[in-house]
Amino acid sequence: MSKQTCLPICLFSVLFSANILAQNPVTLLDDGSDSELYSFEAEVNNYQSKMMACPSASNLVTIYATNNAQRGHMFDIEAINAVTILCFEVNMNVGTTNFEIYTKSGTHVGFTNTPGAWTLIGTAINLASAGVNLPTSVPIAINTGIAAGATQAFYITRTTLSGPTLAYTNGTAVGTVLASDANIIIREGTGKEYPFSTNYTPRRFNGRVFYDLGVLPVEFKNFTAKMKNDIVELQWETVSEENNNYFTIERSLDAVNFTEIKRVSANRSQNGIIEYNDIDENPPLGLSYYRIKQTDDDGKSSFTNIVAVSKEQELLNISTGPIPSTTYLKVAYNSDNESTFQLRIINIEGRLVYEDVIQSRKGYNQAFVNTENFEKGLYYLNINTNGKTQTTKFLKD
C-alpha cells in the first residue's frame, strides 16, 4: 500500500456551522462530461471559525457548492497588494487520503502537464475530510509571497490511488475571476488527474485562502542536508533578510513531529545572498528529516522544505537488485526467525512512495517491489523487523 509523507505545520482546530440545502448521489471522479451526478449547496457565509486553519490576518473564501470532483485542482492567485499565502482550506468528499501542494511563479496555464515547472511545497498524510461542502483544513504551510501585480499558481492534489476526491465546481472559463477582495484575486482553473495528467476545464476551486499582507522578511533560496562521516552537514541560503532574528535547525524521525536541535543567529550585517552552514553531530540511525525554521524579531516564523538523510546500519544483510532498477526491485535479506517486517521506500525529497508489511521466514528471504511507475532517481529503502532497522539505497532508471 502506497503512502506519502507529510509536512504538517499549520495549526488547525475549526468549529463551524453550515446550512445544507440539498444532497444527491456523489460523483467520485470528474470524467469531463457535463452531466452533474452530484449537486450540493451550502451557506458557507454561516460558517464561523473560532480558530483559523493557520494564523492569518486575512482570508478569502470562493464557494462551497460542488458538482464535480477529481484528484486535484490547479488555479491562479493574483496579488493586488503584496501578500504572503499561508495555508488553504478545501472541499473534500468524505474519507481520508494524502495530499500534496505545489506552486509556480506565474499562471498555471500552459504548464498543467509540466512537472518540472512546479515546486513541491509539502505533503499531508491521512487528511480526513470534514464533510462535503464543509471546510477541511490542509496542514501544509504555504508561506509563499506574491508581489503586487504578480500571479502565483497552486496545485492541490490527492496522491493516493483511492480515497476521497477534491471537490470543485464546473466553471465558465479558465482565468475568469472566481473570488476577490481588496488584496487578492482567485481565478477559475483546471481539474487534474494525478499527478500531472488529464485536464478538466474550466473548474472552480472550492475553498478558502488564508494570507497576510506583505511578503515574508526572509526568502529561502536553497536548503540541503547531507551525511558525511556519520555527521549531517546542513547548508541553506537566503536571498533577502529583513528583521530576521534567528534560525532553528529541526529534526524528525517521521517528518511529522520535529524537535529543535540547534539555533543559529541571523547574519544582520550582510546583504544579498547569505549562506549558512552547520552540522548535526549526532544523527540517529536510519532516516532522519531536517528543516530550517526562521523566526522574525516579532516572533513570526517560516520554514524551508524538508530534506531526508539516511545514516545506514548493517543489521539484516540486505541486498537489492537489479541496480539500477527499471520495472522491479528484488530485496534479499536474512531473518533470525519467522516474523513480519515493514518495508518503506522514500524518495530523495523525503516523501514516502511505497510501504508494505511482508511475512518473512527464518533464514534467507526475498521480496519484490514493482518500480515501473517510480520516477527516475535515487531512493532510500528502509526495513524494520524484530526491532532491527536497516536502510540502503537504490537507483531507479
Image (cartoon, rainbow, N blue to C red):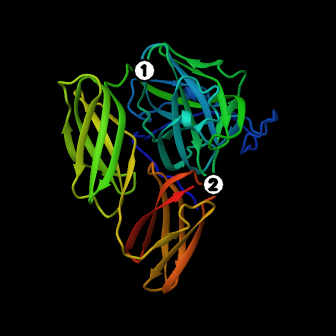
- Residue 112 appears in which quarter of the rendering? top right
* Residue 392 appears left or right of 118: left
Which residue is at a point 43% across and 25% down the rendered structure image? 211
Q: Quadrant of the C terminus?
A: bottom right
Q: Position of residue 114 (x, y in %)?
A: 61, 35
Give the camera-side residue of 143 and 178. 143
Q: Quadrant of the N terminus?
A: bottom right
Give the camera-side residue of 343 and 270. 270
Q: Position of residue 236 (x, y in %)?
A: 31, 38
Which residue is at a point 20% across and 32% down the rendered structure image? 266
Q: Secondary structure at mark 2?
A: loop
- Residue 186 appears in which quarter of the rendering? top right
Q: Is residue 261 above or below residue 182?
A: below
Can residue 199 be seen in this snapshot?
Answer: yes
Q: Is residue 309 above or below residue 217?
A: below
Give the camera-side residue of 186 and 49. 186
Can residue 41 be seen in this snapshot?
Answer: no
Q: Position of residue 147 (x, y in %)?
A: 44, 17
* Residue 169 appears left or right of 297: right
Mark 2: few, some, or many residues within 10 Å (few <14, many ≥20)? few
- Which comes sooner in the sequence, label 1 or label 2? 1
Closest to the camera, between mark 1 and mark 2, is 2
Q: Which residue is mark 1?
A: 83
Looking at the picture, which amino acid does disc 1 mark?
A: Val
Q: Which residue is mark 2?
A: 373
Which residue is at a point 77% across and 40% down the rendered structure image? 31
Q: Is residue 181 above or below residue 163?
A: above
Q: Position of residue 377 (x, y in %)?
A: 51, 52
Give the camera-side residue of 280 and 35. 280
Q: Determine the CA span between mark 1 and mark 2.
A: 38 Å
Looking at the picture, which amino acid does disc 2 mark?
A: Asn
